[in-house]
Amino acid sequence: MAGIEIRRLRKHFGDLHAVDGVDLSIRDGEFLVLLGSSGSGKTTLLRMIAGLERPTSGEIYIGDQRVDGDVPPVPAGSPWCSRATPSTPSDRVSDIAFPLEASRTPRKQIEEKVRWAAEMFSITRYLDRYPRQLSGGERQRVALCRALVRDPKVFLLDEPWRTWTRNCATRPGTT
């Protein structure tokens, strides 16, 4: 994992100041939860960290790398996982391996990581299913697995708390 440093971050949509002057330091390995009412800028902040929104002003660093300028969306090692992470109807659940296949990870390592992630989120029995055959919560767990198999530098989660807490609450030794 890597730390995140945010300095004087702003995002304005015309007259709307969605994020207005955020300074935040998140240490390597630290777990941070953003709480706020709907429309308070939580998702916009996460989208800027992920590179999906360009800030109006300010700086964002993941580790030592500045990521708020002209960088590709979702900087390498920073998976974005929202409550509605899309997948195509032709993708099977086992396609959580796609990020590993795209990076040419050895097949044996891919199989081990997929099995590890699927067991962690209790979706092993769904690996041969398609998204249309899954509930919303099951789809969310698949999205979490897809992000987790990449060994992320940072893990950006937008409202996955229902699935995350339900799964962790039933697994001994997890927090």
Image (spheres, rainbow, N blue to C red):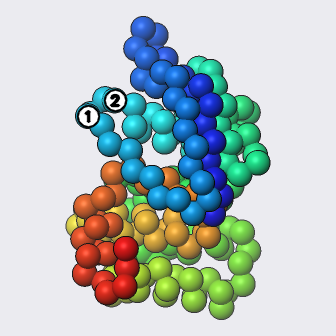
Please name whichever residue, 147 or 106, is drawn nearer the observer in this view of the structure: 147
Q: Which mark is residue 37?
A: 1
Q: Is residue 18 left or right of residue 66?
A: left
x, y percent for residue 17: 43, 17
Q: Amino acid at mark 1?
A: Ser
Residues at discs 1 and 2 in contact (Cβ within 8 Å): yes
Q: Is residue 67 left or right of residue 18?
A: right
Q: Is residue 52 visible?
A: no
Residue at 71 percent of width and 32 percent of height: 69
Residue closer to the observer: 11 or 64: 64
Q: Residue at x 57, y 89 (%)?
A: 112
Q: Which mark is residue 139?
A: none
The reply, left or right, for residue 64 in relation to residue 16 is: right
The residue positioned farthest toward the right in the image shown = 64
Amino acid type, mark 2: Ser
Residue pictured at 76% horizontal, 48% vertical: 64
Q: Between residue 126 and residue 114, name the one nearer to us.
A: 114
| Residue at the top extreme, as displayed | 15
Position of residue 145 measured from the top left corner of the image (x, y, whole percent): 46, 71
Q: Secondary structure at mark 1?
A: loop
Residue density around tag 1, few if under 14, some if 14–19, many if 20 or more, within 10 Å: few
Residue drawn at point x = 43 percent, y = 66 percent = 144
25 lies above or below 122: above
Residue marked by disc 2: 40
Location of residue 1 by image quarter = bottom right
Q: Is 79 on the left or on the right of 62, as rendered?
A: left
Please tell me whether residue 127 is drawn above or below residue 10 in the rendered image: below
- Label 2 crowd (10 A; few <14 / some 14-19 / many >=20): few
Q: Residue 105's spot in the image, x, y percent?
A: 71, 78
